[in-house]
Image (tube, rainbow, N blue to C red):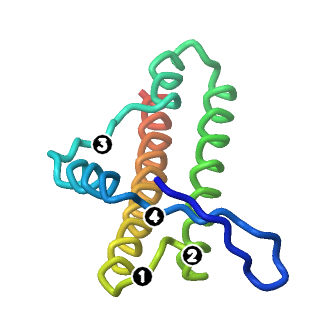
Amino acid sequence: MESEVRQHGNYPPSKVYSLTPAGETALREWVTADPSVPQMRSTFLTQLAWADMLTDDEMASLLDRYGHEVEMKLLMQRELIRRGLSGPARTPREALLWSMIAEHDCALFEAELQWLKELREALKGEDNT
């Protein structure tokens, strides 16, 4: 990495970082390496694995709080997309890639909310057996 201080109008000077040729080579090697599959575990799932000890009210509270957090993340992500702030757009392809990454995040949050709804329904059904 290299940096230089630049003045932008009336704003205070800021450091602008750029890759060195060696850094660009290392980045290219990393980008072309075999991709890894996403991690599928979260702290919430660990909590849920031990949640049988909770009362019905405690379980409902846990699910409500988690659902609220996921909904807030989804709303924030959608707002970033709406404002066009999901990532850099130095080229059309880069803009597309960042847009699709942002949409992927939304899809994950939406799937999590759907799964949470199904979990709640399954727990209600379990109470009736």
Mark 2 or mark 1, whichever is nearer to me? 1
Residue at position x 78%, y 85% in the image: 9
Q: Which residue is at a point 82% across and 70% down the rendered structure image?
A: 12
* Mark number displayed over residue 24: none
Amino acid residing under circle 3: Pro
Res. 38 mark: 3
Which residue type carries mark 1?
Arg
Which residue does the numbered mark 1 point to in the structure image? 90
Residue matched to label 4: 106
Residue placed at 60% from the left, 64% from the top?
A: 4
Residue 20 spot, x, y in % from top left: 38, 58
Image x and y of residue 57, in percent: 69, 28
Relative placement, left or right, of 70 versus 88 is: right
Q: Do the CB atoms of the residues marked 3 and 1 lie less than 8 Å apart?
A: no
Q: CA distance from mark 4 to mark 2?
A: 14 Å
- Which of pointers 1 and 4 lies earlier in the amino acid sequence? 1
Q: Earlier in the sequence, mark 3 or mark 2?
A: 3
- Helix, strand or loop for disc 4: helix
Mark in front: 3 vs 2: 2
